[in-house]
Amino acid sequence: MIDRSHDLPVARQAAALGISRGSVYYLPRPVSASDLALMRRIDALHLELPFAGSRMLRDLLAAEGIAVGRLHVATCMRRMGIEALYRRPSTSKPAPGHRIYPYLLRKLAVTRPDQVWAMDITYIPMARGFVYLAAVVDWFSRRVLAWRLSITMEAAFCVEALEDALARYGTPEIFNTDQGSQFTGAAFIGALSSRKIAISMDGKGAWRDNVFVERLWRTIKYEEVYLRAYDTVSEARASLGRYIAFYNARRPHSSLDRQTPDRAYFNRQPLLAAA
């Protein structure tokens, strides 16, 4: 789709196609095969035991016969964009000039589509590298409204996904994210505040504040990602696109009374979805 010989710059071609510029310039990451295997296992353990920090993960890996130091585990976790998730005092500081917003969803009954949207980023392993997946999700219906892949965790692909969701589905009342710099920067916050959308942010390290997106990552990884070994970003994008289409249109959810996300979202009936 991208024509590098065309007069139109590659960045503008990517924008016209609705894809992340980062994925266009993808080059294999200089990561060893052993580290990629280690990161894949850390990712699976993190999904199973989100409270596990680098020390616990080191010990869990050792019990599986994988000898690795704590600092190496911590380095892999930073590269993957994950950390031990638990409630802690709010002592973290945002990026310079970035404002942190309060969490607005505690004890809020989410009873209809477009009342609350949420967004997050997760690590996606490939055969010889990795990418990051960002998704905008409707809390009530669990429907994936927009998503993007990128080779970096910079804000641009998150803003692209947000703008796509807003263009396709209008505006929610509340938009919830974590406190990552991708979500506290001027471009992302501006897209929300200019539309008068209430901004909500999780407590630092409090995974339960965004539990529905965490459940989505678990579902996508166990039902799609861990069954594949994507060779390229384009292959990952195509395969994930097929799975997300299945997830939205055909996969029933017990919390939605066996409805699919599409049906729950487009039916527009005010029914309280179970947590």
Image: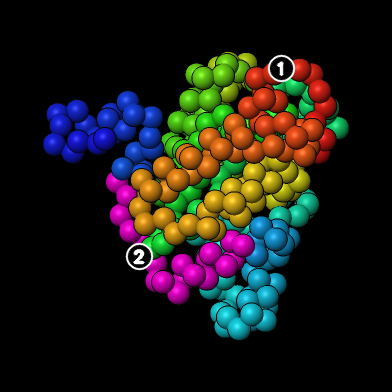
Q: Residue at x 65, y 61 (%)?
A: 46
Across and down, in percent, residue 136 comes to 58, 33
The kind of residue on which mark 2 rests is Pro
Across and down, in percent, residue 59 comes to 68, 78
Across and down, in percent, residue 193 comes to 59, 20
Verify whether residue 72 appears in magenta. Answer: no
Q: Magenta span: helix, strand or loop, mainly?
A: helix
The answer to whether residue 7 is above or below residue 73 is above
Task: Kindly report the distance in space between the C-alpha atoms of the residues bearing marks 2 and 1.
Answer: 47 Å
Which span of residues is magenta-colored? Answer: 25-44
The kind of residue on which mark 1 rests is Arg
Residue 130 quadrant: bottom left
**As rendered, which of 272 and 156 lies closer to the eye?**
272
Q: What secondary structure is marked by label 1?
A: loop
Q: Residue at x 13, y 36 (%)?
A: 5
Q: Which residue is under mark 2? A: 30
Q: Residue at x 67, y 32 (%)?
A: 260
Q: Which residue is under mark 1? A: 268
**As rendered, which of 4 and 250 lies closer to the eye?**
250
Looking at the image, residue 199 sits to the left or right of residue 95; the answer is right
Nearest to N terminus: mark 2 or mark 1: 2
